[in-house]
Amino acid sequence: MTSASEISTIHELGQIKAVCLDLDDTLLDNGGAARHALRELVGTDRAWPVWQRTTDQHYARFITGEIDFDVMCVERTRAFFAAFGEELETPEAARRETVRMAAMQRAWTLFDDARPCLDWLRASGLQLAAITNAPSGYQRKKIAAVGLADAFDALVISAEIGVAKPDPRIFHAACDELGLRPEEVVHVGDKLDTDALGASRAGLHGVWLNRGGTQDPSAGVPSITSLYELPELLVTDLPAVPVRADRAQAPHRVAELIRH
């Protein structure tokens, strides 16, 4: 729920002209695809929490530039099986990772609310951008696979510009590509610190996509639990958005509008 103080602050900052979105677990159900792939690899869902912890540890090393993406994937797989007492040689870890990755790519899919929200934003006259922490080729392949290759006016990938969220420079790079000032841009993502707070610190309007509905009264940014709620947030709490006349429905009907 957006507080009155947050609404007031947003109102003072001026007209919104673009929306940036994170990709993984914001538009695309990356977690669901990864869970499906792990289940195909090991035959059970019970190991998922261990995989999540292992991924967090190793992906952080990729983001900071300590190791490249392909090496990270293999080392993560080795560490995961080591947690269950199975020590793999590098070739076997690489083979299992290839199996897992192929299963994951087959499972890539957008969340149900992603395409309707993007269509609404575009029809409302807003520019669109994606900002993602990821390797270039892998992420571009993913974007094409789910039909988003032509969806954005700007695509900013951490591996291509050398900085990653929450570094303000990656958000400013997106604004520069859009030809807009930070205060004219909203950024939406599923990670509170990396996306919403990172964008806010960079001068954009950060919005936390809190799909799990976790309560965090100290978040300090507006939050939504679904992308179906984003148009209503923009129309109700950011009334300067240039909504087309045929889209100017009563605020309580906006989320319902984009479902159809």
Image: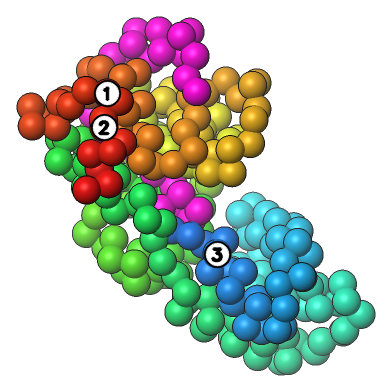
Is residue 16 rendered to the left or right of residue 86? left
x then y, percent, for residue 128: 26, 43
Q: Is residue 162 above or below residue 51?
A: above
Residue identifier under label 3: 32
Disc 2 is placed on an element classified as: helix
Which residue is located at x 50 percent, y 23 percent? 1
- Residue placed furthest toward the left: 245
Task: Please tell me which of labels 3 and 1 falls first in the chain.
Answer: 3
Which residue is located at x 71 percent, y 61 percent? 52
Residue identifier under label 2: 254
Q: Is residue 30 above or below residue 118?
A: below
Task: Please tell me which of labels 2 and 3 falls first in the chain.
Answer: 3
Residue 225 in view: yes
The quarter of the picture where residue 215 lies is top right
Q: Are marks 3 and 1 in contact (CB under 8 Å)?
A: no
Is residue 232 rendered to the left or right of residue 166? left
Q: Are marks 2 and 3 in contact (CB under 8 Å)?
A: no
Q: Are marks 2 and 1 in contact (CB under 8 Å)?
A: yes
Instruction: State the residue in front, 18 or 260.
Output: 260
Q: Is residue 98 magenta?
A: no
Disc 3 is placed on an element classified as: helix
Q: Is residue 229 above or below residue 236?
A: below
Label annotation for residue 251: 1
* Mark 2 to mark 1 CA distance (whole Å): 5 Å
Q: Which residues are magenta?
A: 1-27
The quarter of the picture where residue 37 lies is bottom right
Instruction: State the residue in front, 174 or 109.
Output: 109
